[in-house]
Every structure is written in structure tokens, then in C-alpha cells.
């Protein structure tokens, strides 16, 4: 077996490649790497050569929507709802409901905000948190996590919680 180090690329089908390129470049903030004559566009995620998103123009009678998560800093995930709203998008919580703050997926734990691209694909900004996983907490709003974990030691700390 070959040990996998990380995900290098993922691909999405889009109905309007030009609109999708504008969205992923101007709203999501990815760096456009290459557009082919075969109606495909490729974006670098993070530094060039790190990871890639491919967009392919096409449609069919049955539309499939997919999910892609982009790692971001915690500060950027916390700011994401306001920035998404200013871009005309609706920030969503884990259950797909509009939100003004990230949620925390406690089993990881990670803070995240979801939103949809013009083709309905579910996108996510996510930041891992330095706390001990707490799967019993399920999914909680950022403010709740912050209140219950502000005094907790970070993951790997030898301190005991107060």
C-alpha cells in the first residue's frame, strides 16, 4: 500500500465555465492556473503545485452537486460570513441554514462556514482547532464553542482543564 500524504486535486462540473471561473477567482480567491480549449479551467489551491481544483463545462439531464472544503485560517473562517454576504452569498451552517457565524464540528474539532457556488456545489471554509476533540458536543455554534473552550488547554498541552 502507498501511504497517501494529502489530496492533490478535485474536479467539479459547471454549467457556465466563464461564470464559474469568475466565481472561484473573484469570490473564493483561488489563483487561475490554466484554461484549456476543451472548456476546462484549473485553479491552484494555496501555493502553485500544492493542490488543484478543476472545473469542467458540461451538463446533463441529472445534475449532481458535490462538496469541496478549503482550509483557511481561523480568523478568515470567523470573518467568512460577513465577507460572503458582502459578495451576495448566503453563509450556511452545517444543516444548510443561513448563519452569521461559523459552526464547530466538535469531533475534529474544526470551525467551518458553508456556502454554494453558482452551480449549487456546497463549498466550505474550514480551520482545524487546537482543542481536544469533543464528539459528544456534536455541531455547535462558534460562540458556544468559544465560551466553553476559552479556558480549556490546547490539544497536546499537559495542563488540566480548570
Image (cartoon, rainbow, N blue to C red):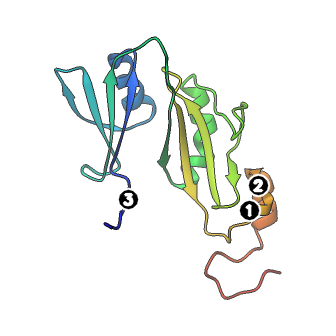
Q: Is residue 123 above or below residue 2?
A: above
Horizontal side of 59 relative to 131 (left or right) equals left
Proximity of marks 2 and 3: CB atoms separated by less than 8 Å: no
Horizontal side of 57 relative to 161 (left or right) equals left
Residue lying farthest to the front in this orientation: 1
Q: Is residue 90 above or below residue 74?
A: above
Residue 11 location in percent, x, y? 36, 35
Residue 148 location in percent, x, y? 81, 64
Query: Which callout, 2 or 3, points at the residue further toward the start of the chain?
Result: 3
Q: Residues within 10 Å of mark 2 (few under 14, many from 20)?
A: few
Q: Is residue 91 above or below residue 9?
A: above
Inter-mark Cα distance, 3 to 1 = 24 Å
Residue picked out by circle 2? 138
Q: Residues within 10 Å of mark 1 (few under 14, many from 20)?
A: few
Q: Residues within 10 Å of mark 3 (few under 14, many from 20)?
A: few
Residue picked out by circle 3? 6
Q: Residue at x 18, y 25 (%)?
A: 36
Q: Residue at x 49, y 51 (%)?
A: 72
Point out the image quarter for the N terminus.
bottom left
Inter-mark Cα distance, 2 to 3 = 26 Å
Proximity of marks 1 and 2: CB atoms separated by less than 8 Å: yes
The image quadrant that residue 125 belongs to is: top right
Residue picked out by circle 1? 135
Q: Residue at x 68, y 61 (%)?
A: 107
Q: SS class of the residue under badge 1?
A: helix
Q: SS class of the residue under badge 2?
A: loop
Amino acid at each position: 500500500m502507498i501511504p497517501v500524504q494529502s489530496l492533490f486535486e478535485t474536479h467539479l462540473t459547471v454549467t457556465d465555465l466563464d461564470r464559474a471561473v469568475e466565481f472561484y477567482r473573484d469570490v473564493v480567491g483561488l489563483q487561475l492556473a490554466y484554461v484549456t480549449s476543451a472548456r476546462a479551467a484549473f485553479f491552484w489551491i494555496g501555493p502553485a503545485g500544492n493542490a488543484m481544483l478543476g472545473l469542467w463545462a458540461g451538463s446533463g439531464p441529472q445534475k449532481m452537486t458535490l462538496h469541496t472544503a478549503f482550509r483557511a485560517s481561523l480568523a478568515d473562517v470567523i470573518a467568512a460570513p460577513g465577507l460572503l454576504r458582502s459578495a451576495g452569498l448566503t453563509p450556511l451552517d452545517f444543516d444548510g441554514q443561513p448563519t452569521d457565524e461559523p459552526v464547530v464540528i466538535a469531533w475534529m474539532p474544526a470551525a467551518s462556514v458553508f456556502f454554494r457556488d453558482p452551480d449549487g456545489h456546497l463549498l466550505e471554509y474550514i480551520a482545524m482547532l487546537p482543542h481536544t476533540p469533543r464528539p459528544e458536543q456534536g455541531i455547535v455554534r462558534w460562540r458556544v464553542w468559544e465560551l466553553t473552550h476559552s479556558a480549556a488547554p490546547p490539544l497536546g498541552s499537559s495542563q488540566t482543564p480548570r
